[in-house]
Amino acid sequence: MVKPAVGRIEPLGLTRSGSFYYGVGGARNDVYVMKIDPATGDVLAPPEKLAKQIEG
């Protein structure tokens, strides 16, 4: 589990390397990526906006 009680999510897809992309409810339509350690769940880098040229 990355975050407890995230609420309603919308699956966006899986990458070949196993990354899972999802959206959460609300008006947030921007996509962020964040590196985590899959063994511990520790955050390795803060979230970064993936596509700044098409925000919202």
Image (cartoon, rainbow, N blue to C red):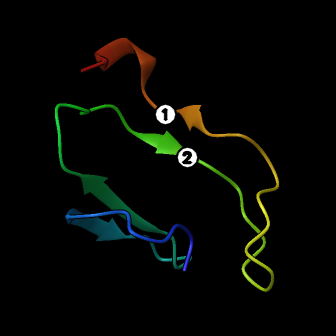
Residue 25 or 12: which is nearer the viewer? Answer: 25
Which amino acid is tagged 1? Leu
Residues at marks 2 and 1, CA–CA distance in whole angstroms: 6 Å
For label 1, the residue is: 50
Instruction: In this rendered view, identify the residue nearer to me: 2 or 36.
Output: 2
Q: Left or right? Give the position of 13 relative to 14.
A: left
**Residue located 42% across and 27% down the image:** 51
Image position of 49 (left or right of 5): right
Give x and y (percent) for residue 8: 20, 64
Query: What crowding class fits label 1: few (fewer than 14 Cα within 10 Å), some (14-19), or many (20 or more)?
Result: few
Q: Which residue is mark 2?
A: 33
Compared across the picture, whether 16 is left or right of 9 comes to: right
Secondary structure found at label 2: strand
Displayed quadrant of residue 54? top left
Quadrant that contains the C terminus: top left
Task: Please say if 53 is above or below 26.
Answer: above
The image shows residue 24, relative to residue 28, as above or below, that is: below
Q: How many marks?
A: 2
Query: Residue 22 lies in what quarter of the image?
Result: bottom left
Tag 1 secondary structure:
loop
- Crowd tier of the residue under label 2, counting other residues whose Cα lies within 10 Å: few below 14, some 14–19, many 20 or above: some
Farthest residue in the top direction? 53
Mark seen at residue 26:
none
Could you tell me which residue is drawn at 17 percent across and 31 percent down?
A: 27
Q: Residue at x 72, y 64 (%)?
A: 36
Which of disc 1 and disc 2 is earlier in sequence? Answer: 2
